[in-house]
Image (cartoon, grey):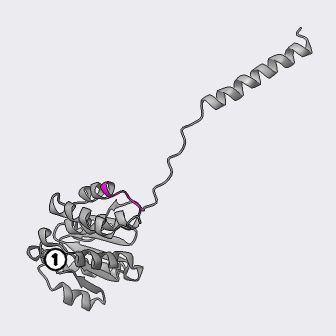
């Protein structure tokens, strides 16, 4: 038989081993959640390459049926970011009017001639929840992804390069649109002073 003192020492040693083992085998620390909402692939009628974040959808190739679906989904505003060669083959202004949806047409002329005003107007709509749910349309979803990237980088604390990469995955064409996002981010970012 063991003496009670020896048994207590064994128990103390066992407890010491158990507690030190627990410290050695701690699970990795949880990665804190990002401060921005996730961008998800979505469906929206016949729109192509649709993405959704919160109450903002963007996609390409809008049809009359998509505007009717927007009405059924409670969309308050449509932002048309189509270039002249991407204009829908129906009267989007009239169709939005018929369904009581506000249409904002940015009158974009091309990827090489986007202006500061274009960014300011698009950001106003993205930022103003009075216009949400918001549907952003263009020919391919590339322009929607472009302005969405700028909004993410400026308002959602997403690093600029991450926002651009996310926009590429969502359909933004490389080249002038990426350069535009970078230039507008530089223009609109708060300056250290």
Q: Is residue 27 above or below residue 31?
A: above
45 shown above or below 35: below
Quadrant in the picture for residue 75: bottom left
Mark 1 highlights which residue?
108
Q: Is 164 positioned to the left or the right of 84 in the image?
A: right
| Residue 73 spot, x, y in % from top left | 36, 78
Residue 30 visible at all:
yes
Report the number of numbered marks: 1
Q: Is residue 158 magenta?
A: yes
- Residue 115 lies left or right of residue 2; in this view the side is left
Residue displayed at 41% across by 61% down = 157
Within the image, what quadrant is residue 22 found in? top right
Q: Tell me the quadrant of the picture where the C terminus can be found.
A: bottom left
- The stretch in magenta equals 157-161
Q: Residue at x 28, y 54 (%)?
A: 165
Locate residue 16, reporting x and y percent. Answer: 74, 24
């Amino acid at each position: 038989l063991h003496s009670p003192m020896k048994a207590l020492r064994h128990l103390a040693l066992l407890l010491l081993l158990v507690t030190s083992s627990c410290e050695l085998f701690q699970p990795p620390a949880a990665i804190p959640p990002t401060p921005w909402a996730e961008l998800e692939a979505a469906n929206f009628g016949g729109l192509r390459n649709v993405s959704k974040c919160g109450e903002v959808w963007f996609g390409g190739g809008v049809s009359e049926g998509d505007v009717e679906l927007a009405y059924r989904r409670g969309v308050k505003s449509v932002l048309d970011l189509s270039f002249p060669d991407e204009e829908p083959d129906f009267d989007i202004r009239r169709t939005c009017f018929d369904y009581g949806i506000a249409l904002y047409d940015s009158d974009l002329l091309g990827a090489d001639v986007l202006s500061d005003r274009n960014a300011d107007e698009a950001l106003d709509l993205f930022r103003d929840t009075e216009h949400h749910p918001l549907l952003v349309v263009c020919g391919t979803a590339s322009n929607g992804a472009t302005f969405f990237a700028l909004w993410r980088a400026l308002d959602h604390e997403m690093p600029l390069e991450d926002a651009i990469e996310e926009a590429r995955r969502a359909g933004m064409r490389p080249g002038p649109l990426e350069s535009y996002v970078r230039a507008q981010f530089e223009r609109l970012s708060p300056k250290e002073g």
